[in-house]
Image: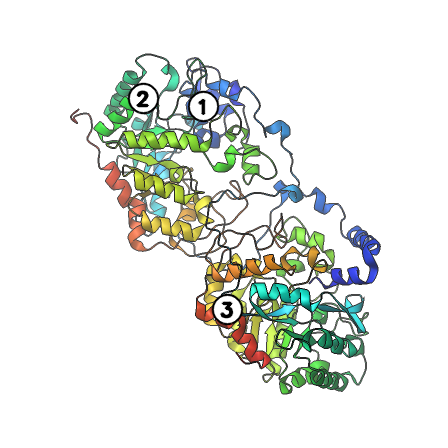
Amino acid sequence: MLHTLSPVESFPGRTEIDQEEVHRTLNRRQWLTGIGAASLAGGAGFSSARGAAPPGSAAETPHPLSLSDFQPRSMLHVAETKVARARFPVIDIHTHLTFVAAEKNGVELGEKIESLAEPGDLLTVMDRKNIRLMVDLTGGAGVGVEEAIRKFQQPNPERFAVFTEPWWERTSQPDYPQFQAQALEKAHRAGARGLKVTKVLGLYLREKVTTGPLVKVDDLRFDPMWDACGSLRMPVAIHVADPEAFFLPIDRFNERFEELNNHPDWSFYGKDFPSFGEILDAFHRVVARHPRTQFVGLHFGCNAENLASVAQAMDRLPNLHVELGARIAELGRQPLTARKFFDKYQDRILFGTDAVPPPYGNATPQQVFGDELYEIYYRFLETEDEYFDYAPAPVPPQGRWRIYGLGLPDEILKKVYSVNAARLLGMRV
Amino acid sequence: MTRKRVLVHLLCGAALLAGYIVAVQGAEEPKQKNTLLLRDFKPQSMLHVPVHNVLRARFPVIDVHNHVNDASSPASERIPPAKVIEIMDHCNLKKIVILTGQWGEALQRVVDETVKPYPDRFMVFTQLDWGNLDSPDFSEQMVKRIDDAVARGARGLKITKEFGLQVRFKNGKLLSVDDPKLDPVWEECGRLGIPVAIHVTDPEAFFHPLDAANERYEELIDNPDWLFCGPQFPSKESILDARNRMFAKHPNTTFISLHLGNWPEDLDYVSDVLNRHPNVAVEFGAREAELGRQPRRARRFFLEYQDRILFGTDATPSEDMYRNYFRWLETADEYFDYYNAPEQGRWKIYGMDLPDEVLEKVYHANAERILGQFKGLAAGK
């Protein structure tokens, strides 16, 4: 379509008009839409309609508009269902209530942890939102995880669970494999309920911990750790790689352009980073090699954009489960494909949000712990609402699109909300 | 994913955080974020979802909303009718209705050049000439024009969108959509058994300021004369109210309310219009984008009003264009471009996966029923 414009004012009265002349000044689309026909057809006093500049006319309109300023308001009138409480009790398997304090080149170091919230504050929200249990995945290692357990899990064992993490700084030492297996046993005795592995593995951890070549996800030195998780019945919650767009240049074709500009350290394009596919393949090799260990592939198997591929992995790997934290944006823009996946794999999908308490979570609006976050997740899972925001933010933070609810039936909701997680955590349903 | 940011908070405090951000952004094309223009943003979807291309419609199609080779097309823009028919044959298009046929000699040209050589494949509608609006006998003139147009071969009346928004009397007063001056026109169409294809108002966003919150910002920047925001324009609702009063006043005239009753953003409203006015049908030309972003609500609408929805495109015939509509109507594909995206707004659409029974009605049966009401000049008063 051409977009050359001609102000309507330029049209003279009907009778003198040369039709061919009008056509040279009108674009086709305007013509089709009828403005042209009106002018041709006459319209005494027609042009007076354009006399005064209307508010919001070109004079006041920002042009050209920066992408970052564009905050379109939807004109759709569609159902808006508020789901204040989950229909069934919830286990949020993916939250961050503590973090390892020290970090270098993206790798957490040491045992010291920092706590991001007080249990009492969390419980108030949890009771309101029908959250039975929150799992603090990033509990750290050594005395750190013991501290996290003491703070959250011990006083409220029915409401909080803490996972431990690998001792990344020891990974370069020759006795690491045995050390790590023993550390897991120790954490387990202290009460840790599972192991969390962050995307540090595959994207940050290097042969000399923070320098040297990247360590692969299926590196053999971790085999005793994976096996110990199996024998201790500690599920492994694992995040490898990241959205496919993070492995592409940050340019105007990148659908997560703004997110990557807000978080440039999330770009894994170029340098010595493996490809998205290589990381995922290595992850699947690990899961296949340790069939007695239960793996929860966080962020929907780390591949929410490609549910056909996740389904293939699920079919091949019966010890693989997925979790939906921070991926309702992806799932909600393919609601039918996602719904089919939920129907088929309803026993292996866990509810999670990747929630981070404020103010720490404020840089990622899709993850700020609070009422709004859970209401959006519940709306996504329980309703068939259409075209709504996946995060409470003026610009959708993970990509400029809106989502659609899955409208899951009760039977599947129960499983996703808590039954599947309870089974993996060895809890009574 | 938030962990690095969290750590920065924890370890460094606010001052260092600021330094960290500057350092990181300094390394990564610092001005890119603020300087990328909306118009340059061409995001490529990373979704891997099924794609079903529908090369031919499942049932023969009548496109009741087209402007190909219409009365105002200059010779240079006209497509040889045989070429249009080739496209139609590829896509299973049975017939195209050229809505903007004007009247008199201009209409005659459309009839002679396109309709007469292929009477089964093309149809043309006539239009009103607003030029003599102030004449005391405007109504009679228009009725005569319509009779003449029907004698020449026109089979319907098209009303374009300046009606209600821009057609004014010499004293500057807008012609209201329910002005009694037009009653004889609507009645004559009813008498002749020709439908009135009517476009009244435009997308809701066109009635809002053209600013960064307007979801059709880019479309309006490209077409500033499509903006109807300001004191000189009535509100969308008041124009549609007048239209609905007009529908109610002429129950023996069939109206094809174009662009999904001109409020596809609010299907509850359109449903209400259809419930109250049995003489009204709707058509969805150039509204694939609006309906496709609310696929479940739209599907319910299509099932409920399956006898009153007509296929139309409002776009120059091409294989790609028709196939886009077919994909939207026939498949359950997700997150794909509407035809001409992102001209109407930056979103993607979803297929409705309509059942055969509904497809057949929407593709041609409803249009055939309405166009088959033709009685012609011999009809009694």
Residue under label 1 = B166
Residue at screen point 51% across, 44% down: B341
Amino acid at the residue labelled 1: Gln
**Vertical placement of B95 versus A116: above or below?**
above
Badge 3 and badge 1 in a common chain: no
Q: Give the Cα separation between the discs numbered 1 and 2.
A: 18 Å
Q: x, y percentage for residue B277?
A: 30, 37
Side of A69 where B366 appears, left or right:
left
Q: x, y percentage for residue A89?
A: 53, 70
Displayed quadrant of residue A163 = bottom right
Under circle 1, the secondary element is: loop
Side of B295 where A291 appears, left or right:
right
Q: Which chain contains the residue that carries disc 2?
A: B
Along the line of sight, the residue nearer the viewer: A162 or B60: A162
Q: Which chain contains the residue that carries disc 3?
A: A
Query: Mark 1: few, some, or many residues within 10 Å (few <14, many ≥20)?
Result: many
Query: Mark 2: few, some, or many residues within 10 Å (few <14, many ≥20)?
Result: few
Say which of marks 3 and 1 sits in front: 3
Residue under label 2 = B180
Render colour scheme: rainbow
Badge 1 and badge 2 in a common chain: yes
Query: Mark 3: few, some, or many residues within 10 Å (few <14, many ≥20)?
Result: some
Quadrant that contains the C terminus of chain B: top left
Res. A189 in view:
yes
Residue under label 3 = A88
Quadrant that contains the N terminus of chain B: bottom right
Residue at screen point 31% across, 21% down: B180
Res. A275 in view:
no
Under circle 3, the secondary element is: loop
Amino acid at the residue labelled 2: Pro
